[in-house]
Image (cartoon, grey):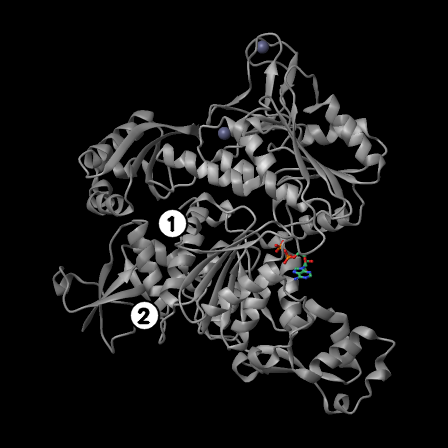
């Protein structure tokens, strides 16, 4: 009999012992085990000679699900590191790292794939016979080089094309395993590419020099400076060595062109991992990558867990993007995990962005990362000129000053597009009674309801609560209810009324729900079907708007005076990203920032000296304030129906840490969002000048925290390197 120590999806920082009869399985195999009255799927994590429990108390494994481990040795190590660094239950780490289908116990076996290939008849065909059907001609030509998977044909040529050729007896379907197909390494066909400029060439050769060993690069280059081209040429070298490349991007829906660009350059299939995939589709990409059947894999945050048989290079694009940090469960940062992964696999990692996160910039400036810079524009993009617009004592119409409306009119008249950015969805952030001043509030969150006129309701943006728009004040029954402040909906309506001759479009999470909806909108914008573009954060990500010559950010003050010390960094990134995505060389744009504090030093630094200068100054400020990246933080959060329980729990946590060497304890204090969905929220911040000391203290006490009686009464979490407070 063997004792297997299993990582189970149970929120406890421990492994669970089971007995097993039979040949000892590999570490990383899945098993089915009894747990209480349930049956769970877990992963064999350790093999033990003996258990602390008597043998007759041990339950037996029900079934071994794999003959070969689902995790390779790199993944086992990374999971171990995640559990240890983030102090997170190993079973939950393992769950996060596994595709959903495997968590559920599905067999880890590749299905047969259907491929189109040419019939005997087609090999004799003169291609010119199909010249009236160019798509069919192209497909035949493609299939002369290699067979092609059915779904891939549908994606690239449309199913009508294959059907027509099938009817003509020119192609047929065969079932094959991936293994039997031609490997991607034999299919690579590099399409035409630009000659790298001097800076690009330097960056590419620096990366190439590190292939086969660990190294981190910060590739800092303004939008349009040719970062993607650097990736492409570095990837080429890796692929030609027969090795795989994993690329992380913030959001795939926003970058279908990027995926296309990679596919087109190398002529091979690209594995794409995003949230809209079914569990089975996700598993297929995972398996293909693990078996080395894919050369290129592109995905969002969780794609960092995708195993590779022959890893060669990791790339994190837009590395500053906050979507790389998971905000619940295992609160890992995919960028930091990428560093660990590159280290474990002994391969280089490229972090690319126009606006590096201060953490990353600090690592580059201190020499920990190699700093590659692309200061020159490669293509035809142009940076919009940035200026502040003083709105003190100015009447605002739907959030815009008169002077701004005049600029909008001017640019529209010139046939350009105008982009307006506001960080609030809905019509207005509050509904106020004009008679008594009462504000309609969500009782679960103690925050004003957002008014959504087009949906005829009030909605809380912090929980799911919604209700019809009231006709009278709850408090004094007056009928004079007025909206306060401006959201995207009101701005759009105002502009549509003010500029009836032009068409407007609103891009926020309310209007872009649904498959391909955002992609459709973006295409229409690039076809000039809309002239006024109104939106939130989404506008700043990934997409280029060559015909936009005016960008207005309605309100930058919120971020300048925020209690979150990262707010200014995020605002600067947003402004710079927006400025870089509008206009082009012969049609450069202008950008206006509406503010009540036009002389604010951060704003002035940013618009006059650029993000790079701003960021170095912001780092200096962080250093003086002893904030990350110059200190290290961990945040305990607790929430409960009673504020007293949450506070009491964190007070007990604070008591554990109060004597810890080199660790400062701040709190417990109410969270920025004090109440949410009826729960009171408190937090306790730990900070240290040395990562090691903080880790040591956490190691020492997290077990005791978990064992506190109140720990089962409140909902608590630990966030190491928190990004949000
Ligand atoms: P980034 O990723 O930094 O935004 P891209 O790599 O997308 O920049 O490059 C912007 C544009 O410039 C693209 O159209 C690209 O094809 C083009 N480009 C990039 N490098 C070169 C080069 N060396 N010569 C000519 N055009 C280039
Ligand atoms: Zn009232
Ligand atoms: Zn609410």
Instruction: Tell me the quadrant of the picture where the N terminus can be found.
Output: bottom left
Residue underneath mark 2: 63
Residue placed most toward the observer, 355 or 665 = 355
Q: Nearer the viewer, mark 2 or mark 1?
A: 1
Quadrant in the picture for residue 309 = bottom left
Residue 260 image offset from top left, x and y in percent = 66, 63
Instruction: Tell me the quadrant of the picture where the C terminus can be found.
Output: top left
**Circle 2 — which element?**
strand
Residues marked 2 and 1 touching at CB (< 8 Å)? no
Residue placed most toward the observer, 571 or 202 = 202
Q: In this view, does 68 lie to the left or right of 590?
A: left
Q: Residue at x 80, y 27 (%)?
A: 497
Quadrant in the picture for residue 189 = bottom right
Quadrant in the picture for residue 429 = top right
The response on whether ligand 3 sits within 8 Å of label 2 is no
Q: In this view, does 197 lie to the left or right of 318?
A: right
Q: Is residue 680 left or right of residue 50?
A: right
Q: Which residue is drawn at 24% across and 66% down?
A: 46
Residue 2 image offset from top left, x and y in percent = 20, 72
Residue underneath mark 1: 330
Residue 577 image offset from top left, x and y in percent = 61, 44
Whether residue 41 is visible to the viewer of this picture, yes or no, is no
Counting the numbered discs, the total is 2
Residue 349 image offset from top left, x and y in percent = 46, 61
- Which sits earlier in the primary sequence, circle 2 or circle 1? 2
Write down which quadrant ligand 1 falls in.
Answer: bottom right
């Amino acid at each position: 009999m063997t004792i297997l120590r299993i990582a189970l999806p149970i929120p406890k920082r421990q492994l669970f012992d089971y007995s097993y009869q039979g040949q000892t399985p590999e570490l990383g195999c899945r098993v089915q085990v009894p747990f209480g009255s349930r049956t769970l799927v877990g992963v064999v994590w350790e093999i033990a000679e003996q258990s602390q429990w008597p043998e007759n108390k041990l339950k037996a494994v029900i079934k071994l699900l794999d003959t070969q481990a689902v995790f390779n040795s790199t993944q086992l190590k990374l999971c171990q590191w995640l559990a240890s660094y983030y102090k997170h239950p190993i079973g939950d780490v393992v769950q996060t790292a596994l595709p959903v289908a495997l968590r559920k116990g599905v067999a880890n076996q590749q299905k047969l794939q259907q491929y189109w290939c040419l019939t005997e008849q087609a090999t004799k065909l003169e291609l010119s016979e199909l010249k009236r059907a160019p798509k069919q001609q192209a497909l035949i030509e493609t299939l002369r080089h290699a067979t092609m998977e059915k779904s891939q044909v549908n994606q690239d040529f449309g199913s009508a094309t294959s059907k027509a050729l099938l009817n003509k007896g020119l192609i047929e379907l065969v079932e094959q395993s991936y293994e039997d197909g031609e490997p991607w390494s034999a299919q690579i066909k590099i399409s035409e590419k630009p000659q790298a400029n001097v800076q690009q060439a330097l960056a590419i050769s620096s990366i190439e020099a590190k292939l086969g060993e660990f190294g981190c690069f910060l590739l800092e280059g303004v939008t349009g400076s040719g970062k993607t081209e650097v990736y492409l040429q570095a990837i080429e070298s890796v692929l030609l060595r027969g090795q795989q490349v994993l690329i992380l991007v913030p959001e795939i829906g926003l970058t279908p062109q990027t995926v296309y660009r990679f596919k087109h350059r190398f002529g091979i299939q690209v594995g794409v991992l995003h949230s809209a995939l079914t569990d089975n589709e996700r598993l297929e990409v995972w398996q293909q990558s693990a078996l080395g059947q894919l050369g290129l894999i592109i995905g969002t945050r969780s794609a960092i867990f995708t195993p590779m048989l022959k890893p060669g290079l990791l790339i994190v694009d837009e590395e500053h993007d906050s979507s790389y940090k998971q905000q619940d469960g295992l609160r890992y940062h995919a960028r930091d995990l990428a560093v660990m992964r590159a280290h474990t696999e002994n391969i280089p990692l490229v972090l690319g962005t126009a606006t590096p996160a201060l953490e990353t910039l600090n690592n580059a400036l201190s020499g920990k990362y190699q700093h590659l810079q692309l200061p020159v524009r490669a293509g035809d993009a142009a940076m919009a000129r940035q200026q502040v617009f003083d709105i003190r004592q100015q009447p605002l119409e739907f959030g815009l000053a008169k002077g701004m409306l005049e600029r909008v009119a001017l640019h529209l008249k010139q046939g350009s597009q105008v982009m307006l950015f506001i960080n609030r969805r809905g019509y207005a952030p509050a509904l106020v009674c004009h008679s008594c001043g009462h504000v309609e509030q969500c009782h679960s969150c103690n925050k004003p309801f957002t008014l959504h006129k087009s949906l005829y309701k009030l909605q809380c943006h912090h929980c799911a609560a919604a209700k019809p728009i009231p006709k009278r004040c709850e408090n004094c029954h007056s009928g004079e209810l007025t909206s306060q402040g401006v959201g995207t909906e009101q701005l759009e309506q105002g502009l549509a009324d003010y500029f009836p001759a032009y068409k407007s479009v609103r891009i926020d999470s309310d209007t872009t729900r649904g498959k391909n909806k955002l992609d459709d909108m973006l295409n229409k914008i690039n076809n000039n079907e809309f002239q006024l573009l109104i939106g939130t954060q989404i506008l700043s990500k990934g997409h280029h708007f060559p015909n936009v010559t005016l960008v207005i950010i309605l309100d930058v003050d919120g971020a300048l005076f925020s209690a979150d010390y990262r707010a200014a960094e995020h605002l600067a990134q947003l402004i710079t990203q927006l400025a870089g995505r509008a206009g082009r060389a012969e049609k450069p744009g202008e950008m206006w920032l509406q503010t009540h504090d036009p002389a604010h030093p951060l704003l002035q630094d940013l618009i006059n000296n650029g993000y790079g200068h701003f960021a170095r100054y912001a780092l200096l400020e962080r250093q003086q304030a002893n904030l990350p990246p110059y200190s290290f933080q961990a945040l305990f959060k607790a929430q409960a129906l009673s504020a007293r329980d949450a506070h009491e729990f964190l007070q007990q946590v604070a008591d554990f840490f109060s004597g810890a060497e080199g660790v400062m304890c701040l709190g417990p204090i109410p969270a920025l969002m004090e109440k949410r969905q009826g729960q009171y929220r408190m937090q306790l911040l730990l900070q240290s000048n040395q990562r090691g000391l903080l880790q040591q203290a956490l190691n020492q006490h997290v077990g005791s925290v978990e064992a506190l009686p109140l720990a089962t009464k409140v909902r608590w979490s630990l966030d190491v390197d928190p990004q949000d407070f």
